[in-house]
Image (tube, rainbow, N blue to C red):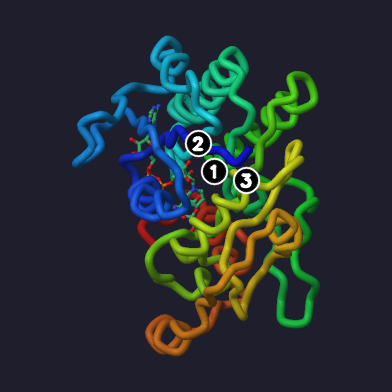
């Protein structure tokens, strides 16, 4: 049966806020979880992923988890270890113990961020390209994908790991023309990932059907995802303001963009 009640971790964040408004249209009842209070949602669970008792209770009875909580940019290793590596492990353990059948995991393009971006005419980057994390952050997403594989092989807990590109209301730089996922396409993809049958552990890239797309969406489409948006209408303005991607600049020529710089460039 299609999942109905979904635990949304990271509900106070940027993507969590977008999905709180978009996913109910698909018929989900969302249970919210974040270490920060969720504005306008007094019933949200305010707890850290380190709190295993709170996690057990949070996942009890849900049909699936959309796991967005975690540090979403580069940070010192100790922080990434706590929130993203141990935190994601704690979530999987709670889900296993409570018999939750599926997790949709917010992985990231930064798990493969040091992969050179394809040039015009090159093949798209396949989903099974070797992982090349560009940061401790990307490394934590690589860990999450392996953890998901372990919990599928050992415990039969299913996961769709979504290597999200850039999911924001609009693309804000030239790289994002290639990796952007509109919020509406994000909701379409998460819905497909929550409902497709027999996913085992499936890894997909998460983006819209961008004209300048860098990676292969075949595994995402196989879930039933049909992207409807394309960043191209933003291209002329962004390129006029910022120029074309510079083939001599590593931050322009790798999937991970400015995350490959040392230190990573914020904001960008
Ligand atoms: P965000 O930083 O706005 O939101 C993350 C949320 O997680 C925050 O509300 C934060 O309070 C919560 N959180 C962090 N550590 C926690 C902990 N230990 N316990 C409980 N809650 C904790 O990030 P955003 O953009 O909403 O991203 C959501 C997820 O999607 C993240 O896992 C991020 O890595 C991933 N992602 C997002 C992309 C995007 O374009 N927005 C691209 C690729 C991946
Ligand atoms: C990510 O993984 C980040 O969480 C998000 O804030 C963006 O930086 C995105 O990648 C990106 O690559 O643009």
Q: Residue at x 52, y 33 (%)?
A: 65
* Ligand 1 within 8 angstroms of badge 1 C-beta: yes
Residue neighbourhood size for the residue with mark 3, other residues' Cα within 10 Å, grouped as few (<14), some (14–19), many (≥20): some
Q: Which quadrant of the rendered structure holds the N terminus? A: top right
Give the SS element for disc 2. strand
Rendered image: mark on residue 138? none
* Location of mark 2 (residue): 67
* Ligand 1 within 8 angstroms of badge 2 C-beta: yes
Q: Position of residue 118 (x, y in %)?
A: 72, 71
Q: CA distance from mark 3 to mark 2?
A: 15 Å
Left or right, 1 with respect to 16, comes to: right
Rendered image: mark on residue 106? 1
Q: Position of residue 24 (x, y in %)?
A: 40, 49
Q: Are marks 1 and 2 in contact (CB under 8 Å)?
A: yes
Q: Are marks 3 and 2 in contact (CB under 8 Å)?
A: no
Q: Residue at x 50, y 36 (%)?
A: 67
């Amino acid at each position: 049966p299609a999942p109905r009640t979904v635990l949304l971790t990271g509900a106070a964040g940027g993507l969590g806020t977008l999905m709180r408004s978009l996913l109910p249209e698909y018929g989900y009842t969302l249970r919210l979880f974040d270490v920060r209070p969720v504005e306008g949602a007094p019933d949200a669970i305010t707890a850290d992923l380190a709190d295993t008792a709170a996690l057990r209770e949070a996942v009890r009875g849900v049909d699936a988890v959309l796991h967005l909580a975690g540090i979403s940019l580069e940070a010192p290793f100790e922080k990434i270890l706590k929130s993203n590596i141990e935190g994601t492990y704690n979530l999987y353990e709670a889900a296993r113990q409570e018999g939750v059948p599926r997790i949709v995991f917010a992985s990231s393009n930064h798990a493969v961020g040091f992969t050179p971006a394809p040039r015009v005419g090159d093949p798209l980057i396949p989903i099974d390209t070797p992982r090349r994390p560009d940061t401790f952050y990307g490394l934590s997403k690589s860990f999450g994908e392996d953890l998901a594989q372990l919990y599928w092989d050992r415990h039969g807990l299913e996961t769709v790991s979504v290597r999200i590109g850039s999911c924001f209301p609009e693309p804000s730089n030239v790289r994002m023309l290639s990796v952007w996922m509109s919020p509406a396409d994000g909701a379409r993809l998460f819905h497909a990932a929550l409902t497709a049958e027999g996913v085992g552990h499936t890894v997909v890239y998460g983006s819209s059907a961008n004209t300048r797309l860098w990676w292969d969406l075949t595994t995402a489409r196989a879930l039933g995802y049909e992207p409807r948006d394309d960043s191209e209408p933003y291209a002329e303005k962004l390129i006029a303001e910022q120029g074309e991607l510079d083939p001599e600049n590593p931050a322009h020529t790798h999937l991970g963009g400015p995350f490959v710089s040392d230190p990573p460039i914020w904001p960008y």
